[in-house]
Image (tube, rainbow, N blue to C red):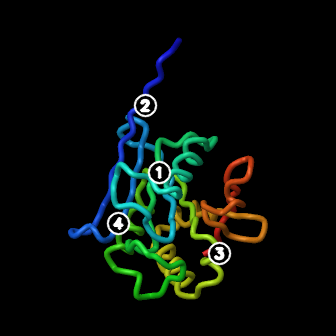
């Protein structure tokens, strides 16, 4: 019999009144400079570091199983607000959140950026505009690491059945 242990660290950045979550970071390596994946999703699902919503759990499982062997991941969102609707408008975006997204994606520990916002990238003009605006602010070498989570018919969200098919996530380069 063998005992296997893992130490997992979770970190969040919230606004002062805890109504917006800007960042969720989960690492399972003790390296001083961990190799990370940054996943851009639509909006946060939980404001408690001890509670994982389904999207976060799926991201965690996929990143842990990637062949590149990353040490953890960071989730940033197009909006820090917890929305109860699927459609996003420009009123949902904030400068504070935008700054966190750009700074996080630009961090040298981030080796891959995955856009996982589903079909909104192609069907919602405001979302498309915001995503393009944020990605254009990244250094050129980071722009080259951006990929999108894909299904058979285009971009998908981690919750979709297409993203959870056998064989793990299917990623494609995202042209900015």
Residue annotated with mark 1: 73
Q: Earlier in the sequence, mark 1 or mark 2?
A: 2
Q: Estimate the spatial distance between the alpha carbons at disc 4 and disc 3, rounded to whole Å.
A: 22 Å
Tell which residue pokes out farthest to the front in this image: 84
17 relative to 132, above or below:
above
Dot in front, 1 or 2 = 2
Residue annotated with mark 3: 119
Q: Quadrant of residue 24?
A: bottom left
Q: Secondary structure at mark 2?
A: loop
Dot in front, 4 or 1 = 4
Residue sitting at x 70%, y 64%: 150
Residue annotated with mark 4: 21
Cβ–Cβ under 8 Å for marks 2 and 3: no
Tell which residue pokes out farthest to the right in this image: 152
Residue 47 location in percent, x, y?
Answer: 34, 61
Q: Earlier in the sequence, mark 4 or mark 3?
A: 4
Residue 104 location in percent, x, y?
Answer: 40, 61
Q: Quadrant of the C terminus?
A: bottom right
Q: Estimate the spatial distance between the alpha carbons at disc 2 and disc 4, rounded to whole Å.
A: 26 Å
Residue 158 location in percent, x, y?
Answer: 60, 60
Q: Estimate the spatial distance between the alpha carbons at disc 4 and disc 1, rounded to whole Å.
A: 16 Å
Cβ–Cβ under 8 Å for marks 4 and 1: no
Q: Earlier in the sequence, mark 2 or mark 3?
A: 2
The residue closer to the viewer here, 7 or 100, is: 7
Q: Secondary structure at mark 1?
A: strand
Q: Earlier in the sequence, mark 2 or mark 4?
A: 2
Residue 22 location in percent, x, y?
Answer: 36, 66
Residue sitting at x 70%, y 60%: 161
Residue annotated with mark 2: 6
Q: In the image, is 104 to the left or to the right of 157?
A: left
Crowdedness of circle 1 by 10 Å Cα count: few (<14), some, many (20+)? Answer: many
């Amino acid at each position: 019999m063998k005992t296997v242990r893992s130490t997992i660290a979770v970190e969040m950045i919230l606004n002062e009144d805890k109504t917006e979550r800007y960042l969720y970071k989960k690492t399972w390596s003790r390296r001083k400079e961990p190799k990370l994946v940054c996943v851009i999703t639509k909006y946060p699902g939980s404001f408690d570091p001890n509670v994982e919503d389904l999207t976060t759990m799926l991201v965690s499982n996929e990143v842990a199983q990637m062949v590149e062997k990353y040490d953890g991941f960071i989730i940033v969102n197009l909006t820090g607000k917890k929305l109860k609707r699927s459609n996003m408008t420009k009123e949902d975006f904030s400068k504070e959140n935008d700054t966190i997204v750009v700074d996080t994606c630009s961090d040298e520990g981030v080796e891959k950026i995955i856009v996982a916002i589903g079909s909104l990238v192609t069907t919602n003009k405001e979302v498309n505009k915001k995503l393009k605006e944020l990605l254009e602010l990244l250094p050129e070498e980071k722009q080259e690491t951006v990929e999108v989570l894909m299904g058979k018919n285009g971009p998908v969200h981690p919750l979709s059945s297409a993203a959870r098919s056998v064989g793990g996530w299917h990623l494609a380069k995202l042209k900015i």
